[in-house]
Amino acid sequence: MILFLGVNWPVMKYGLQFIPPLHFAAARMALGGLCIGLFAAARGALHRPTRQDMPLVLGVGLLQMAAFLSLITIAVQFVPAGRSAILAYTTSLWVVPLAATFLGERLSRFKALGLLLGLGGVAILFNPGGFDWSDPKVLLGNGLLLLAAFIWAVLIVLVRGYHGRSSPLSLGLWQFALATAVLVPLALLVEDSGRVQWGTPLGLILLYNGPVATAFCYWAMLTATQALPAITTSLASLGVPVLGMLSAAVALGERITLTNSLGLCLILCGVAIVSIVDLRGRRTATVQTGAPDRGE
């Protein structure tokens, strides 16, 4: 998931030459929903959500799919792809207080160290002097990315604290359908459909974004969010902007400075520490309880 989402940042930036942002987001949701619906049906996992599942359907469909995706797609028009990836994944900044307040999650010393390193890397990369404050579009883009990060943090906490009856795969079609139902009329209302430039480049971009970067990655992220502590999930997801910045440098020629490199190193160290501590904790619990280790 980290690999597919990371390389998709320059792909999105490139794709917006051929399609307006809300049309792009709506197409991703429609194609992603079709793919995950067919996959769920083939596995016999497709069924209507129960009443207990509806908070999960509404939360993921409206917050993660419709709101988060539309905000970052609009923003990446005005912000470099690598920087967009970093700002969108400042989610961990918001998850920490939310998880501590509403979930009662507690940080060990090593997890706290990993958290500080990861957030320190983001803080270095998020340099307010790195963009033009006089340009309204640049300010709008950066603001939308931070808003998207906060919305995703709220969803992470909501999903972690909620236990539905159905699997993420069985609910995927309904979540994508809800997001599509919101984004399609919104795109038609505020954007000019005549700006869509149909052809091979756009077709390839949508082919990657629908089945891979949308259907598979959203399902994988939701599954990980349900299985891991919220803080661990948010820190591990920082691998996406790391790859986003590197792939944007390769594909789009975006410059990686010494500051960017230092930030990337701190993020990688933070992710590694948290992942190792979490894995050891699960293995210790497995030995003590004799339960199967689902993390293997």
Image: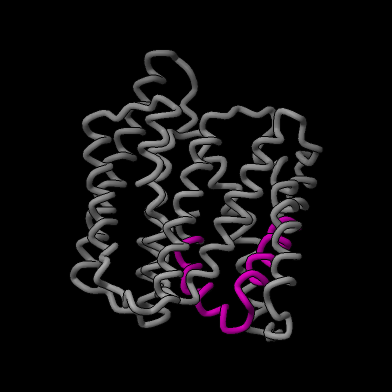
Q: With respect to residue 265, does 175 lie above or below?
A: above
Quadrant assignment for the C terminus: top left
Q: Residue at x 27, y 46 (%)?
A: 270
Q: With respect to residue 101, does 24 lie above or below?
A: below
Residue 81 falls left or right of residue 21: left
Q: Nearer the viewer, residue 251 or 23?
A: 23
Task: Where is residue 57? Give x, y as percent.
Answer: 68, 41
Task: Where is residue 17? Give x, y as percent.
Answer: 57, 84
Q: Residue at x 51, y 39 (%)?
A: 225
Task: Where is residue 283? Give x, y as percent.
Answer: 37, 26
Q: With respect to residue 147, does 196 lie above or below?
A: below
Task: Provide the major secondary structure of the magenta segment.
Answer: helix
Magenta residues, as a range? 5-34
Q: Is residue 93 visible?
A: yes
Q: Is residue 28 magenta?
A: yes
Q: Residue at x 63, y 66 (%)?
A: 25
Q: Is residue 155 magenta?
A: no
Task: Where is residue 74? Give x, y as percent.
Answer: 54, 70
| Quadrant hosting residue 80 | bottom left
